[in-house]
Amino acid sequence: MDFNEFYQLALKLKNLPLPGTDSHNKMSPDLRIQWLKQNKVEDVNPKRAGVMALFYPDVEQETRLLLILRKVYKGVHSNQIGFPGGKVEMIDKDLRDTALRETHEEVGVPPKEIEVIKGLSEVYIPPSNFLVKPYIGVYPQPKPFVKEEKEVESLVEVYLKDFMDDSNHIQEILSTSYAKNINVPAFKLNGYTVWGATAMMLSEIKELLRQVL
């Protein structure tokens, strides 16, 4: 889809209610759904984080969505696909600021050049005890991304049309930090399996976009 057309339609997202948990559950392993039924997130005092789902035009003005592949490191999210973003720092005014600052640090996009369209439903991640707030942003006049070499292995630039294509919904047997060989719903994007919290956030974004595209 041409980015200018996408941008005008995306502005309509501001007035839409969030699909929330129902959209998350479509991409959640059963174990996670059961955990949330039996536990209260506020009881575990989660750390907070903000991430940015960034839409932008490529050189041909086709709309793309930016994901990143994280570096291999000693942590539960090692070598996984995610959004630019990270944990709250003392300098952040709010979670929106966190998402913008981290996007700047990880992929080189200045906060003033991102138009934040909408905040999304928070997603709790039990293995790392993070409560994550995603935002939809647009980057209308993109410059080349500059990845943070210590944290970002590579950029994953997904065509909007591929993201919206239902044939890219899959089920895959995965071993996670909390279970072995479980059936997990996921997206297959640019050859990568995108699952877990990122897939849940993508599911809510996709449901919102279906209402305006």
Image (cartoon, rainbow, N blue to C red):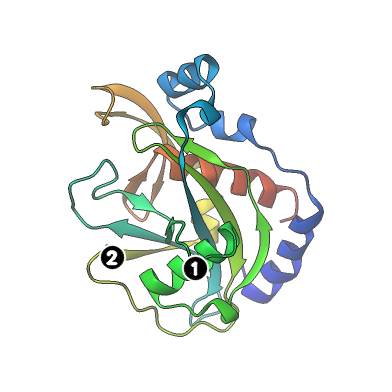
At 55% across and 49% down in the image, what residue appears? 133
At 57% across and 57% down in the image, what residue appears? 95
Relative placement, left or right, of 100 versus 102 is right
SS at mark 2? strand
Q: Position of residue 23 (x, y in %)?
A: 61, 34
Res 183 → quadrant? top left
The kind of residue on which mark 1 rests is Ile
> Which residue has dot 1 on it?
91
Nearer to the camera, 165 or 50: 50
> Which residue has dot 2 on it?
154
Name which of mark 2 and mark 1 comes first in the sequence.
1
Q: Where is residue 108 in the image (x, y as percent from the top left)?
A: 41, 78
The kind of residue on which mark 2 rests is Ser
At 23% across and 22% down in the image, what residue appears? 180
Nearer to the camera, 80 or 106: 106
Depicted 150 relative to depicted 146: above or below: above
- Can residue 20 be seen in the rendering of this structure? yes
Res 194 → quadrant? top left
